[in-house]
Image: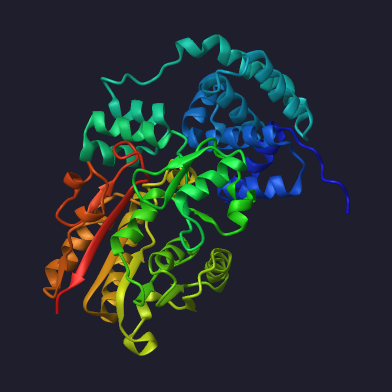
Amino acid sequence: MAAKKTLNAREASLLALTKIEEEKAFANLALADVFAAHALDERDKRLAAEITYGVVTYRLTLDWLINQITGRPVTKLDRPVLHALRIGFYQLLYLERLPAPAVVHSTVELIKKGKKRALAPFVNGVLRGFLRKKSSLPWPDPQLDPLAYLTLRYAHPEWLVKRWLERFGREETEKLLAANNQVPPLAARVNTLRINRDALLQRLAAENIRAFASEVVADGVIIQGGGNLTAVAAYREGLMQIQGQSAMLTSHILQPTAGAKVLDGCSAPGGKATHLAQLMENSGEIIALDLYEHRLALVEANARRLGVKIIQTACLDVREIKPAHFGLFDHILLDVPCSGLGVIRRKPDIKWRRQEEDIISLAVLQREILAAAVRVLKPGGTLVYSTCTNEPEETEEIIRDFLSHHSDFTAAELTPYLPVGWQEQTGAYGIQLYPHLQQVDGFFIAKLQKIS
């Protein structure tokens, strides 16, 4: 086998950004492909990830800056040159720890190594031009045009900023936008089938991983410093599962009991299904549905690694489920497909891929999923509906409309499952979690009970 080509951080970032644009890959997958195919030391991997995610996060702002300095639309620039300029501008504007001369030099060298080496003087001139002019650029006035200012300052689509301004007002919107641009904490769930939280924390410390207990869920830990957790022994041995605190809270709110029959209607990759099994003490039955076999394979792989024995997967659209398939269920979890706008800080790509009309079409799908799933819920059973978005059409409006047409269901109380300080934040139909308020992923969680 031929030795892998060695790359530095900027070269890896350039390859990842090219994959993102040409193959429509998400940033995490593009980076994983680049790291798998090439040799990089850990320091370069970290910097490559920081630059790649930074460029994706601030793409709108970076392109505006490039346009201001070059005097031409970014669509007129050669793709390798544009990617290199984005990499350079991001470092100059947002990574102040890096000396500007070194950033300029490394960006010019990046172009020299590629097919557009003749444009190296152009790239050098643009970067130096930015350093000369950056204090006099015509940024929008925050008072006269808050929409344009917030859109450009925090690099979010204008349609989304406009929606949030209308719903939250200026101050709250700016806090949410700022939170979306922060690096989120890395959380993991303790697999209590094999270890308790204190013991896992000790084990992680022995592997030189700094971690502390979550204050949101009793089986959660927060990892300091990030890194590739799937490579550590505690993960490989099935002692933990990488999972956000909001997602963990969803399973706790469903609160399935040992021996219960549970449906996970939109299961892959299996984080919540395996959590439900854990809460059920590996006793009972969980039916995990997904549309695609390859995604169900992820559920099965996670179950094997974690020692979960009670999950049965089935390739089935939850909208087509009938009692004849599996009978009736004590509990149902519906973590429905959604716009994903609550997890922008984890997946910055999503804000550039979504359009406002997607919210409406997804709401139609969500209503169909909920209407179908309740047909297989036992009287007295409970159902949790969750989304990783906070848009009203996908959250409260879904539940409000459902309850108005189903007198045999009621909204269950959530406060017993919530951390101290969150109990007053529940609404009539569920709880909205935001990164700038509760410092967790943006989520909506509602719990319904069938009363007859």
Is 75 located above or below residue 131 in the figure?
below
Residue 271 image offset from top left, x and y in percent: 46, 60
Q: Is residue 173 left or right of residue 200?
A: left
- Where residue 297 appears, as percent x and y from the top left, is 57, 70
In terms of depth relative to the viewer, which is nearer, 329 or 24?
A: 329
Q: Residue at image x 53%, y 44%?
A: 202
Front residue (pair 117, 249): 249
Q: Residue at x 42, y 49 (%)?
A: 220
**Residue 427 picture location, percent across and down:** 17, 51
Residue 23, visible in the rendered structure: no
Q: In front: 116, or 225?
A: 225
275 in relation to 425, above or below: below
Specify the quadrant that holds the N terminus. bottom right
Q: Residue lying furthest bottom in this view?
A: 324
The tally of labels here is: 0
Q: Residue at x 45, y 50 (%)?
A: 197
User: Relative to the observer, which residue lies in front, 165 or 398?
Assistant: 398
Image location of residue 361, percent across then percent down: 33, 61
The C terminus - image quarter:
bottom left
Q: Quadrant of residue 76?
A: top right
The residue depicted at 44 percent of the width and 74 percent of the height is 289
